Image (tube, rainbow, N blue to C red):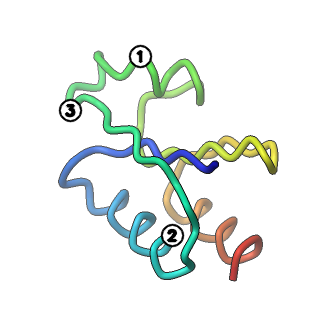
Amino acid sequence: MLELYQLEGCPYCEVVADRLDELEVDYESVWVEALHSERDEVKRVSGQRGVPVVVNEAYGVTMAESERILEFLESTYA
């Protein structure tokens, strides 16, 4: 299952979550801390602390940056 690391109120995260919903992709939200210094889980999976981050083990994908994520979603699920 796809995992979306996101932050409450993050507009970039919301765009990705909305597109996942539109494409009817099952995903699990992993909510992260507001402080960058406390985003250890995001750092562990992606090597950086920014969100959104998508992890899709079925496709061997871990990526950040909403534009890249949206391109991946379009090419994989649309």
Task: Tell me if 30 is positioned left or right of 57 in this view.
Answer: left
Report the Cα–Cα distance between label 1 and label 3: 12 Å
Residue topped by disc 1: 40
Q: Quadrant of residue 17?
A: bottom left
User: Helix, strand, or loop for circle 3?
Assistant: loop
Lower position in the chain sequence, tag 1 or tag 3: 3
* Residue bearing mark 3: 34
Label 3 amino acid? Ala
Disc 2 on helix, strand or loop?
A: helix
**How many residues crowd mark 1 within 10 Å: few (<14), some (14–19), many (20+)?**
some
Q: Amino acid at mark 2?
A: Leu
What's under tag 1, amino acid-wise?
Answer: Asp
What label sits on residue 7 in the rendered view? none
Residue visible at 51% across and 27% down in the picture: 48
Measuring from the top left, give residue 41's x and y in whole percent: 45, 21
> Which comes sooner in the sequence, label 3 or label 2?
2
Which residue is tagged 2?
Answer: 20
Is residue 72 found left or right of 30 in the rendered image? Answer: right
Q: Residue at 25% x, 29% y: name it.
A: 33
Q: Residue at x 55, y 61 (%)?
A: 26
Q: Is residue 7 above or below residue 39?
A: below
Label 3–label 2 contact, CB within 8 A? no
